[in-house]
Amino acid sequence: MDTGLEFPETVQYVQSFAKSRNERLKIAKAGNAFWDNVGAFGPPAKDFRWCCKVCKLGPLTTLIEENYRDGTVTIEGNRALESFARTDIGFVERNPFVPNQTVLNPIRHWIAAEVWGYIWMEDLEFNPLYEQDFERIGCYLCASCLGSEWKATGEIHPDLHAEWEASLGEWGEQVGVSPEFVRYGFWRWKSLPPKMRLVAEELQMKVPQMRSDSMELRISKGASPCVAGGFSMEGVLTVPHKRDFSQVAEALKTVGKVKFSPEFEVVMVKAGDGTLKMFGGGHISAIAPTRDGAQALFRAGAEAFLRGQLCTSCRICERNCEFSAITADGQLKVDDRRCRQCGKCVEACVVAHYYDKLVTAGEGRPAYAGVK
């Protein structure tokens, strides 16, 4: 999987490893996808990894579709101790964002010492970057890399280091943050963790309350009884407006029957016994016979808004649709004559899953959820 942001050493290592063992090597190339999208989305963050969708999942889905129509079994080196997110990783996993891929994780319970012990025991080649102060190796500009690793990158690849530093500087000027905000790595988060807030206080640096590429969800009315019967839920979702609101209307066709007014930027969706209204400014209003129904419809509207505005044309949703009802090559289009509102395109969309992050970020705060 060549994201276009790989270290030259990594590319050379993979090619050498395959060649020395006479193994077939198929490469899913993202090309210039990162640089084509960074201007619209801003730098990727630990809690906003849009780059993974664009540079990994999209190209990988294409490679599998073109070469393995019946699906693949992928052997991977994921380990439970690598991160909190992988703590409960199973031996057999399904990749929800890549159709027809089953992942096996045979060393999920190994510790790092066992991995290295096996490498030395079998006299295996390994990426030379591990001997140059790199703990984990991925994209050279990853928001999750250690500070020491970024410093090492500057020493061995000053050209790559300088290019990303310059891009971050330009972004900082555009969104109005101080040079220190970029220099000390605050760009690595949308929502700053407590440790970084403490660092900001120690530096006496003002952290901006809102960044131009932020996402925020304000729930003004949780699922509650309506005077006319049933339940309603309302809120406002703020995301970077990267696309025309008509793209949101297209995404909503996967929820129900859509009526769209381009002039007033308003969409009304009839989904079963529920009704959803959405406006270009991000206001969402859901009404359904039950409390759970209102919450589910509100969520569906928010996910459609995210998909419509932040779609990167990775086409993963397209490949997950069994009815060929959706295309996402440049513009999102849904054929409502074919669509069965099964929800598989939403399940496969990384952008739609930011809804969970928005809600989780606001837990403990009444009527508010936000990622900034």
Image (spheres, rainbow, N blue to C red):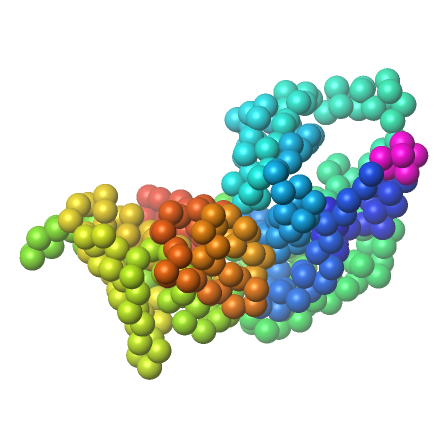
Instruction: Say which residue appears at 37% left-offset and 67% top-offset.
Output: 249
- On whether residue 7 falls in the magenta region, the answer is no
Pick the residue in front: 345 or 6.
Answer: 345
Q: How many marks?
A: 0
Left or right placement of residue 2 versus residue 329 in this view: right
Q: Residue furthest bottom?
A: 263
> How far across and down, in percent of the image, does residue 133 sit?
81, 39
Instruction: Say which residue appears at 80% left-offset and 20% top-offset.
Output: 118
Q: Give the range drawn in magenta.
A: 18-23
Identify the image quadrant of residue 124. top right
State whether residue 26 appears in this view. yes
Instruction: Say which residue appears at 23% left-offset and 43% top-offset.
Output: 292
Pick the residue in front: 240 or 346.
Answer: 346
> How far across and down, in percent of the image, does residue 331 sit?
52, 68
Identify the image quadrant of residue 244. bottom left
Judge whether 51 appears above or below 73 on screen: below
Pick the residue in front: 168 or 139.
Answer: 139
Instruction: Say which residue appears at 69% left-offset and 64% top-offset.
Output: 35
- On whether residue 21 falls in the magenta region, the answer is yes
Left or right placement of residue 288 versus residue 360 in this view: left
Left or right placement of residue 225 versus residue 286 in this view: left
Q: Which residue lies furthest to the left in this view?
A: 228
> How far across and down, in percent of the image, does residue 114 sit?
75, 19
> How far across and down, in percent of the image, does residue 301 sit?
34, 57
Identify the image quadrant of residue 252. bottom left
Pick the residue in front: 229 or 139.
Answer: 229
State whether residue 220 appears in this view. no
Judge whether 132 appears above or below 362 on screen: above
Left or right placement of residue 138 versus residue 284 in this view: right
